[in-house]
Image (spheres, helix red, strand yellow):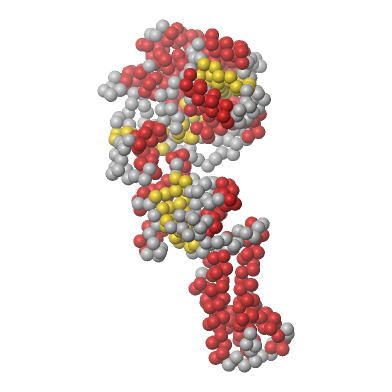
């Protein structure tokens, strides 16, 4: 561009540069001007701008570089030619020509990319808190642009770290990319930055949990706070009317996985226009099932729960969010055959989402009869009632604790799985109800979850209690779990391969609970083991060091539902299951706890009654 600008400026001045072709200074001037420009552009960082993010910062850089080029070129040209026969206005014209040649393509590319002009000319803001951005992509560019527009922005961006280091040395809106995350320590100690940052802002769109954990670890190591930007779609919406609000790193960000691509049409087809009954509708899973079901326009929604208060809460919640949705709250217990049959007869559901259960391991360990009556007998009562009432489909919510169970809760849920597994092929063959079982692990924020416990302990100043330093768990957000449950259910109804099998949700990588505790302390702005202590209390009755989603003898098959696999556990014949569960129910109704545990151990071979009894008898249990 610089080489082309010199003869072009001469032509604009004279109208005919052909008369200068034979004169040496035209060629000397062109080569000399291009050489001076190359050196100036190199040292001014002009080659490091990213065209797709061109802005007023690039315009300022171009203006400075072109001015310096002309000022350095003039004395050199004077020494060589004494400026004889050179129009005195040529340097001024050349300045405008070169600025236009350098800036025009950049800004034209930006306008074509964004299909708008106002993004190019954005005013500067007056930030105060020094920050480093992690990520050098579109979200970073949108954030920087928004910060320049917002004069009340509280941040000054000192630099950018690219998680991969691919754009090291480049600039976005004048802010330099200093390297990768591995370069952070050197950057903080080298004096390169104008001041020490106080905060890291994760500006990469949809960061992985591994990246979030890495950045969190760096922030903890260097005593920096950490926040993140909203999703890229939220940033694009926010740049039109208001400044972008950064948000704290949530524990869900550390544990989540990339969002599965869901088939919303199949989920809508599962629910839309149908009468849907949710058992355990007041619980963490049941209430989310009710909320998401309401969003798919069912013909009518029935909420069933044994807790009056929880039933009232979810009923009021849905009244506020879906005022036009027909719904009925039913108070009752799934262990009550008469009540379940009454609800089925009155409401006539076409889809039953069965989430009612006792899920807290130590509580069920101390109350085994109640666990059997609710989790096993209650599930059988609901399943039999669905079949008798001609319900189209029943979805059974199970748990990873049903795999190799070491506690009563897991054993009762495994028996419920086994009954549904035996019932489904028989029921399908007769053209009756289809039964779908879905198994997954811990849900963040659910009743009995470790996260609310840690939150309460943090609020009171600690300590945070962890049962064992090596204990690990699978975690999933309640929203994602329910989305995948509905996705699996929609596929399970139509897929003949799912008959008698269990859908297992992809829970990602298990997380050490100790690491989770430390991260929650850090995210609260405190230092683990200094501000907040962590205490180890020992494994609770029935608790395992790690959970499993699949039994070693279960065949694993691919599933048509994204984010799930199909497990084929050992199956029992339906008549045998009916006989066994009837006997188990008899001793449970008679409150014969010892007999209940003995039969439970016989029906679920993995459940070691002697080991379970020993743990329950330990001090502190």
Most foreground residue, 587 or 389: 389
Q: Quadrant of residue 597?
A: top left
Do we see residue 108 in this rendering?
A: yes
Q: Quadrant of residue 297?
A: top right
Most foreground residue, 431 or 296: 296
Residue 395 sits above or below residue 57 on the image: above
Residue 474 sits above or below residue 609 on the image: below
Do we see residue 376 in this rendering?
A: no
Residue 394 sits above or below residue 61 on the image: above
The residue shown at (40%, 13%) is: 369
Horizontal and vertical percent position of residue 295: 61, 31
Question: Which quarter of the image is occupied by the C terminus?
Answer: top left
The residue shown at (69%, 83%) is: 13
Horizontal and vertical percent position of residue 203: 49, 51
Q: Residue furthest left?
A: 619
Residue 120 sits above or below residue 316 on the image: below
Horizontal and vertical percent position of residue 530: 28, 44
Most foreground residue, 44 or 186: 44
Horizontal and vertical percent position of residue 65: 54, 74
User: Would residue 248 be found to the left or right of residue 346 on screen?
Assistant: left
């Amino acid at each position: 561009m610089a080489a082309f600008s010199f003869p072009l400026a001469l032509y604009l001045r004279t109208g005919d540069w052909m008369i200068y072709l034979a004169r040496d200074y035209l060629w000397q001037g062109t080569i000399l001007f291009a050489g001076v420009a190359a050196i100036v552009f190199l040292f001014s960082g002009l080659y490091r701008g990213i065209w797709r993010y061109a802005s007023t910062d690039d315009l300022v850089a171009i203006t400075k570089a072109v001015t310096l080029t002309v000022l350095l070129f003039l004395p050199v040209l004077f020494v060589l030619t004494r400026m004889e026969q050179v129009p005195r206005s040529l340097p001024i014209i050349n300045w405008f020509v070169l600025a236009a040649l350098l800036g025009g393509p950049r800004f034209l590319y930006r306008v074509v990319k964004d299909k708008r002009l106002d993004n190019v000319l954005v005013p500067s803001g007056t930030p105060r808190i020094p920050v480093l951005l992690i990520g050098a992509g579109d979200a970073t560019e949108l954030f920087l642009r928004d910060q320049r527009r917002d004069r009340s922005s509280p941040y000054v961006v000192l630099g950018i770290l690219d998680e991969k280091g691919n754009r090291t040395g480049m600039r976005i809106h004048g802010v330099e990319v200093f390297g990768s995350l591995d370069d952070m320590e050197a950057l903080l100690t080298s004096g390169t930055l104008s001041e020490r940052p106080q905060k890291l802002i994760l500006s990469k769109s949809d960061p992985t949990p591994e990246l979030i954990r890495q950045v969190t670890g760096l922030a903890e190591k260097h005593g920096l706070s950490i926040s993140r930007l909203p999703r890229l779609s939220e940033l694009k919406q926010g740049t039109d009317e208001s400044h972008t609000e950064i948000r704290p790193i949530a524990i869900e960000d550390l544990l989540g996985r990339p969002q599965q691509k869901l088939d919303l049409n199949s989920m809508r087809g599962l629910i839309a226009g149908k009468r849907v009954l949710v058992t355990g509708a007041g619980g963490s899973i049941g209430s989310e099932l009710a909320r998401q079901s309401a969003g798919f326009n069912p013909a009518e929604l029935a909420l069933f729960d044994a807790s009056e208060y929880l039933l009232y809460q979810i009923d009021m919640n849905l009244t506020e969010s879906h005022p036009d949705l027909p719904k009925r709250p039913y108070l009752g217990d799934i262990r009550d055959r008469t009540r379940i049959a009454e609800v089925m007869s009155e409401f006539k559901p076409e889809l039953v989402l069965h989430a009612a259960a006792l899920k807290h391991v130590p509580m069920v360990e101390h109350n085994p009869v109640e666990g059997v009556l609710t989790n096993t007998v209650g599930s059988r009562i609901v399943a039999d009632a669905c079949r008798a009432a001609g319900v189209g489909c029943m979805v059974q919510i199970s748990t990873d604790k049903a795999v190799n169970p070491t506690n009563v809760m897991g054993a009762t849920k495994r028996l419920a799985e086994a009954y549904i597994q035996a019932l489904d092929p028989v029921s399908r063959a007769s053209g009756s109800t289809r039964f779908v079982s879905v198994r997954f692990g811990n849900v963040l924020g659910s009743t009995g979850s470790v996260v609310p416990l840690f939150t309460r302990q943090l609020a009171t100043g600690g300590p945070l209690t962890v049962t064992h330093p090596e204990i690990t768990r699978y975690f999933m957000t309640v929203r994602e779990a329910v989305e995948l449950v509905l996705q699996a259910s929609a596929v399970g109804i139509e897929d003949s391969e799912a008959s008698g099998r269990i859908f297992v949700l992809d829970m990602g990588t298990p997380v050490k609970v100790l690491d989770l505790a430390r991260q929650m302390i850090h995210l609260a702005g405190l230092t683990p083991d200094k501000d907040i202590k962590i205490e180890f209390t020992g494994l609770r009755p029935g608790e395992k060091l790690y959970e499993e989603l699949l039994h070693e003898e279960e065949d694993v098959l691919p599933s048509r539902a994204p984010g799930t696999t199909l497990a084929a556990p050992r199956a029992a014949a339906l008549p045998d299951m009916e006989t066994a569960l009837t006997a188990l129910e008899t001793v449970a109704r008679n409150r014969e706890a010892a007999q209940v545990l003995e039969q439970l151990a016989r029906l679920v071979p993995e459940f070691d009654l002697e080991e379970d009894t020993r743990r329950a008898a330990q001090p502190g249990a």
